[in-house]
Amino acid sequence: MPELPEVETIARGLNKRVRGDVIDSVWLGSHREPLKSPAQEIAAALTRTRIAQVRRVGKHIVFDLEPRRSRNGKGSRQWIVHLGMTGRMLVASPKDEVPKHTHAIVSLASGRELRFVDPRRFGRLSVVSQPSFVGPGTEPLTVEADDFAKLFRGRKTPIKAALLNQRLLHGVGNIYADESLFRAGIRPLRQAGRLKRVELERLRAALQEVLQEAIRSGGSSVSDYVDAEGREGFFQLQHNVYLRTGLPCLVCKTPIKRIALGGRGTHFCPKCQK
DNA sequence: CATTTCACCTGGTGGC
DNA sequence: TGCCACCAGGTGAAAT
């Protein structure tokens, strides 16, 4: 569900609301899919730790946990949450009704709860103990021109597929790949390695603009997405191509085309994008 | 390696 | 109303 702007919005909201709070106890549901390690291990690693901060890395929410001051403490850990397609991470009150598909409830010393809800169960919870969690790829918001160009050098795959590859740029998903290619005037099927330097620079600028604007709008709520407080984003109102199949291009009125690329719906304007 | 395809899930929508 | 096909912010394993 959520891409970089949505995860950024959620992580900022969580950081604001639960930074400094202490995890008292953890309940995990019976479905195995959302857990990357045994429930016991995850619950044990989280229980009685303080949340030092919450941040985003790629599409992951990272809770930096302060080490417990016990003799056998293993040092600092991170609780890593990936929301998959339909995951939500919500700050709630224990009095609030627990929605269907709730897979984890983390009770905080402040009396509130963190709830992980995910109907499709593509999301994942894990705990790592590296000092700093680094994502699979390069951060799109800050990547510079030379590094950006280098990522695509020699690649025969379509540029859209390359944008979705988390080992290259992490955080870009289907909405913002389509939207940034539209803004850059580049067709999704163009071979990544054959893009000219000026096109790559247009693409980098377009991608960073569209991600920043989406963060300012609190993300795109297409179906499930809400932030940590349960509020929808509104960047979907500014989409130029995503899910606009057959509708007139907002620039030239040509109907927006939809193709399947690597199993993902891909939307573009056949006239504006070359 | 790089690239492509498909399975993993539930739920909403639209056609008949 | 029901049934069915298709679609959906994502990955990761297996095949090519």
Image (cartoon, coloured by chain):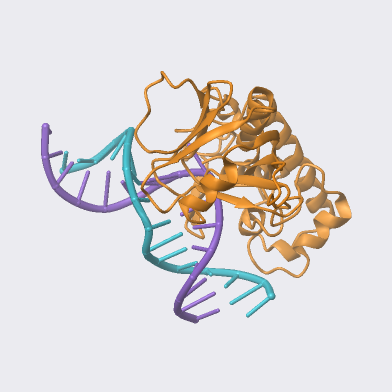
Chain colours: A orange, B cyan, C purple
Q: How far across and down, in percent of the image, does residue A200 sit?
A: 79, 53
Q: How far across and down, in percent of the image, does residue A158 sit?
A: 63, 61
Picture layout, residue A30 above or below residue A18: below
Left or right of residue A57, residue A230 in this image = left
Count the marks: 0
Taking the image as drawn, is residue A269 in sight? Answer: no
| Residue in front for this viewpoint, A247 or B12 | B12
Q: How far across and down, in percent of the image, does residue A174 sit?
A: 57, 46
| Residue in front for this viewpoint, A189 or A98 | A98
Residue drawn where x is 70% and y is 52% of the image: A74
Q: Residue furthest front?
A: A71
Q: How far across and down, in percent of the image, does residue A185 sit?
A: 70, 45
Q: Quadrant of residue A268?
A: top right
Residue drawn where x is 42% and y is 53% of the image: A33
Left or right of residue A219, residue A205 in this image = right
Left or right of residue A102, residue A153 in this image = right
| Residue in front for this viewpoint, A135 or A28 | A28
Residue drawn where x is 71% and y is 53% of the image: A169
Taking the image as drawn, is residue A27 in sight? Answer: yes
